[in-house]
Image: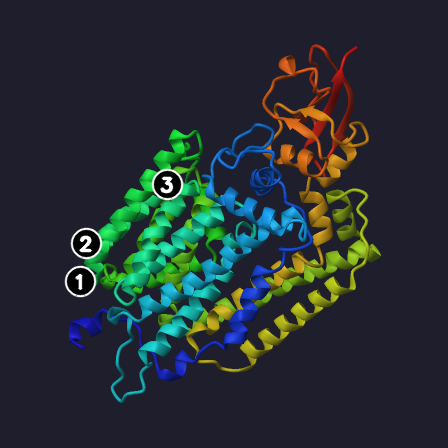
Amino acid sequence: MSSSTQAVTPALVTQKAVKRLPRWALLLFCVAYVLPGLFGRDPWKGIDIASFGHMWSLADGQASWLHPNVGGVLPVGGGILPYWLGGAFIALLSPWLDPATAARIPFALLLVSVLSLTWYATYHLARTKAAQPLPLAFGGEALPQDYARAVADGSVLALIASLGLLQLGHETTPELLQLVSGTLFLYGMASAASRPWQSRLATLVCLPVMAASGSPTVALELAAAGMLICALSEDVLMRSHLWWVAASGIVAAMVATALTSTGLPGWALRIDTWSGIGRTLRLFTWFTWPVLPLAALTVWHWRRQVARRHIAVPLFSALVGFGACIAMDANDRALLQALPALAVLAAFALPILQRSLGSAIDWFSVFFFTTAALLIWLHYGAMYTGVPAKMANNVAKLVPGYATDFSWPLLVLGAVATAAWLALVRWRTARQSHALWKSLVLPAGGVALCWLLAMTLLLPPLDQSLSYRLLVNRIKRHVPVGTCIAAPNASTGLLTGLEYFGRYRVDGLTPPSNVPRTCPVLIYSLPAKNAAPTFPGWRRVARENQRTQNSESVAIYRRAP
């Protein structure tokens, strides 16, 4: 290796430092991260239940597969492919699984795909010549394959540790399919020189899928970034890969145009007024922790090789996600696209991470996640014993009248997860490990622990507070099941709740003055403290609140005599 190359290669890694993370341990991390929340809960308020509503309406035959809708309300975004995916699994697994669980299964598989593709993308990038560490004067440097595996293990741990992926990665929303497409693009660019045909197929598929999932603009931005990287590359295979990236971008544009021409969500340039740098920085800080600081460290130390593939590919992909987030007024779902690329960059910071910084990450993780787990356990105990009283009151305010049956399996699962965390902390703090991935074990383990505890110990109250089931059950006191309901200002989530939990026939488009006589009930959605309006020809019979503090409410009307 020439002296000029040595001067710009900051990694200095011994064979001892590239010890593999045991496969069972990496698999356990992924299982503890993916499975909690998959079973035993309703679709939650917001985009989660809105997306599920379109999927369920397709599988239930209430909407055409070419025009998904809930109560006549079309999806605002998300293309059509995510709804087809969820609807197909609901239809396929019915009646063995309830529709909500069946719809979550393909999206759990998508999350697994994101983790797997991130590992393989990092592995192929770490195998490139420019990414390899310096040879040592007396030998003993890391072997290329072992070095690549260790860095790839670190990228998966970094992605699991990312706070922004935690909730959004466990929803049934189009953004998860968009995320898989972006990660597949990352893999295609990373493996272009080592796995030409696999990378070409991945590249050709990923951008059209992204366009059909509601994000054609980001797909074209990724195509432009990929073409630039290929054009600047010195590798012959990378330069030839440019045409495959271009073809994928063209097909993505054609898919978006075809969807738009048929009245479906296709081209959607969503640009919002920027609310300021403060809100954006706050989002960047918590959403991308801890991968953004490590990614910035990588870019700084590898700044002389920023045009090399192992830096350029994830860097440009992350910049596309940041640009989309800023253009959409600090939209966290747009920023989700940057996380896998940031995790790849963060993994390349591990060979150059100073011991003091690694220790700071470890001790911060121990303090933060142990405290969070302790608070979860205290709230769990307060739910059943009333002690501490303040925490019991907090649960009562969140879900007034909350009551649930004690579950031994959930308690045992939470206890096992907590014991595993304590064992992990003891392992990390009681011995000196030389493995590259050591500094990301505790952040990833802490995130997985808190998510698992929340989805076991606190799942019943969380599910009651975030589901429409309780509100619909209160509406049933006044409206018989099967009644036609007009709900002109209701959100897609509330329309879904009325149809799914209440089995009502819902019209979400017709205004109160034009509701046909076949719909005897009108429901009007209101903020918590607003007065209910009056409508000519309608008589208000009740007003029901969701059983959560300061939650939305609905006014129920019947036709006046």
On screen, residue 19 above or below 445: below
Badge 1, how many Cα within 10 Å: few under 14, some, many 20+?
Answer: few
Numbered disc 3: secondary structure: helix
* Disc 1: which residue: 236
> Is there any visible trace of residue 299 in the rendered image?
no
- What separation in Å lies between label 2 and label 3 (alpha carbons)? 22 Å
Front tag of 1 and 2: 1
Q: Give the label on residue 86, or none.
A: none
Q: Is residue 539 left or right of residue 36?
A: right
Task: Give yes or no for contact between labels 3 and 1 (Cβ–Cβ under 8 Å).
Answer: no
* Disc 2: which residue: 231
Q: Return the x and y of residue 184 as percentages of the image width and height.
A: 38, 56
Badge 3, how many Cα within 10 Å: few under 14, some, many 20+?
Answer: many
- What separation in Å lies between label 3 and label 1 (alpha carbons)? 29 Å
Q: Mark 1: which amino acid? A: Val
Q: Return the x and y of residue 441 as percentages of the image width and height.
A: 51, 70
* Disc 3: which residue: 216
On screen, residue 174 above or below 511: below
Q: Is residue 490 left or right of residue 230?
A: right
Q: Mark 2: which amino acid? A: Ala
Q: Mark 3: which amino acid? A: Pro
Q: Is residue 427 left or right of residue 503?
A: left
> In what quadrant of the picture does the C terminus appear?
top right
Numbered disc 2: secondary structure: helix
Ranked by sequence position, the earlier of labels 2 and 3 is 3
Front tag of 2 and 3: 3
| Residue 125 or residue 135, whichever sits in front | 125
Badge 2, how many Cα within 10 Å: few under 14, some, many 20+?
Answer: some
- What separation in Å lies between label 1 and label 2 (alpha carbons)? 10 Å
Q: Return the x and y of residue 512 as percentages of the image width and height.
A: 65, 16
| Residue 528 or residue 537, whichever sits in front | 537
Q: Return the x and y of residue 257 as percentages of the image width and height.
A: 35, 34
